Structure formats: C-alpha cells, structure tokens
Image: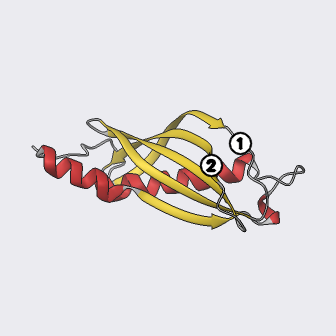
Amino acid sequence: MIHKTDLEQRLKTAETHVFKVVFPNTTNHYDTLFGGNALQIMDEVAFIAATRFSRKRMVTVSTSRIDFKKPIPADTIIEVIGSIVRVGKTSLDVLVEIYKEEMYNYSREKAIEGIFTFVALDKSKKPTPILP
C-alpha cells in the first residue's frame, strides 16, 4: 500500500514539461500547427508522464475529448505539460495541455488540452497493477 505523501510526491515528480518551436513543416494550409502533429506531441508527453509515474510499460488505450481552443501559428514556442489526474488499478489518465507563447513578446495562453488513458502491461503484455 502506498502512503498518501508518497503518492503525492510521485504525482508531482511525474509532471512532464516539454518545450518546442512550431516550424513551418509542422503546419497546415492555414500556417497553424497541424492537429495530427499536436496529437503526436501530446501522446508522447502523456507517455513520458505515465511512465515516470508508474515505471512500468505503458500503452495508450484512449483519448478523451481533445479541445483545440486556439490556433498555434508557425514560429511560436509551445510548452506541453503532462500531469497525472487519475490512477486506477491498471490504468491512469494524463491531462495534457499545450500553451502557446509568441516568440517576441510575453503573450502566453492555453491552446489545446486533452486526456490520455494508459494501461500498464507486464512482460506478457497483460494489464498489471500500477501501484504496489
């Protein structure tokens, strides 16, 4: 059984921050970040957060409502943050948020958010408990 303080520390330690630049080769015909590229980045950050928390083999099993709130133009800095928001027996949920920052001023706002669900697998690729 994991103690509440240990769980809180693991949750805090697992939070993952990644910064990227939106280059023109990742944009659509409107010169904004292509949705598929955003989802790929979000899934990667979610995977890192899930793995850092569980230290198990994790696989994405679903996403829940990805909200594209603001377009992200080329030549923008993004910060992608993955935070564990639910821990079940063999699965967990990661909230992933993308914030956009203009390169040459201090403007920053949330652009995209979504929930990614992961399952921990053992060596036989069967679901396994996340917590002891």
- Local packing at callout 2 (Cα closer than 10 Å; few below 14, some 14-19, many 20+) is few
User: Would residue 49 appear left or right of 12 to someone viewing this image?
Assistant: right
- Local packing at callout 1 (Cα closer than 10 Å; few below 14, some 14-19, many 20+) is some
Instruction: Give the residue number, with chain letter if any, for mark 1.
Output: 70
At 51% from the left and 36% from the top, the residue drawn is 62
Instruction: Give the residue number, with chain letter if any, for mark 2.
Output: 109
Q: Which sits in the foreground, 17 or 86?
A: 17
User: Would residue 89 appear left or right of 73 to someone viewing this image?
Assistant: left
Distance from the alpha carbon under mark 2 to that under mark 1: 8 Å
Secondary structure of the residue carrying tag 2 is strand
Q: Residue furthest right?
A: 29
Is residue 81 positioned above or below 76 on the image?
above
Q: What type is the residue that disc 2 sits on?
A: Glu
User: Would residue 4 appear left or right of 80 to someone viewing this image?
Assistant: left
Is residue 107 positioned above or below 118 on the image?
below
**Residue 55 seen in render:** no
Secondary structure of the residue carrying tag 1 is loop
Q: Whole-percent x and y of residue 105?
A: 70, 64
Q: Which image quarter: residue 70?
A: top right
At 77% from the left and 65% from the top, the residue drawn is 75
Q: Which sits in the foreground, 81 or 44?
A: 81
Q: Whole-percent x and y of residue 50?
A: 38, 51
Q: Earlier in the sequence, mark 2 or mark 1?
A: 1
At 71% from the left and 48% from the top, the residue drawn is 36
Q: Are marks 2 and 1 in contact (CB under 8 Å)?
A: yes
Q: What type is the residue that disc 1 sits on?
A: Lys
